[in-house]
Amino acid sequence: MYVCLCHGITDSQIESAIDNGAHSMKQISQELSVGSQCGKCCQCTKKVLSSKLMQISEAQPAAA
């Protein structure tokens, strides 16, 4: 699904950036330019970020 129409960025691209180490809105914006034009994509980008980080944290083994 397209998240940022101004730059043609999809949720898959955002998730890929997170997998490659972007773990904040600022880092995603620097890498993909989301939120740098009209800003309407920021809320959806934050939801994708939050969801993906939750998946990553749930996949890690619990500390003993």
Image: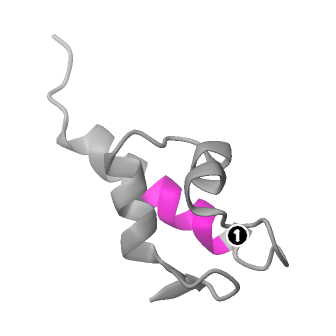
Q: Secondary structure at mark 1?
A: helix
Q: Residue at x 36, y 73 (%)?
A: 12
In the image: residue 12, left or right of residue 7: left
- Viewer-proximal residue among 48 and 2: 2
Q: Is residue 6 left or right of residue 60?
A: right
* Quarter location, residue 16: bottom left
In this rendering, position of residue 55 left or right of residue 35 = left
Query: Dot 1: within a 10 Å radius of its alpha carbon, few (fewer than 14), some, or many (20 or more) residues?
Result: few
**Depth check, front residue: 8 or 61:** 8
* Residue most extreme to the right: 38
Residue 45 lies in the magenta stretch: yes
Q: Quadrant of the N terminus?
A: bottom left
Majority SS type along the magenta span: helix
Instruction: Tell me the residue that label 1 is attached to.
Output: 43
Percent position (x, y) of residue 21? 39, 39
The segment highlighted magenta reads 44-51
The amino acid type of the residue labelled 1 equals Gln
Q: Residue at x 62, y 73 (%)?
A: 44
Residue at 70 percent across and 69 percent down: it is: 43
On-image quarter of the C terminus? top left
Q: Is residue 40 above or below residue 20?
A: below
Q: State the image quarter where residue 13 is shown.
A: bottom left
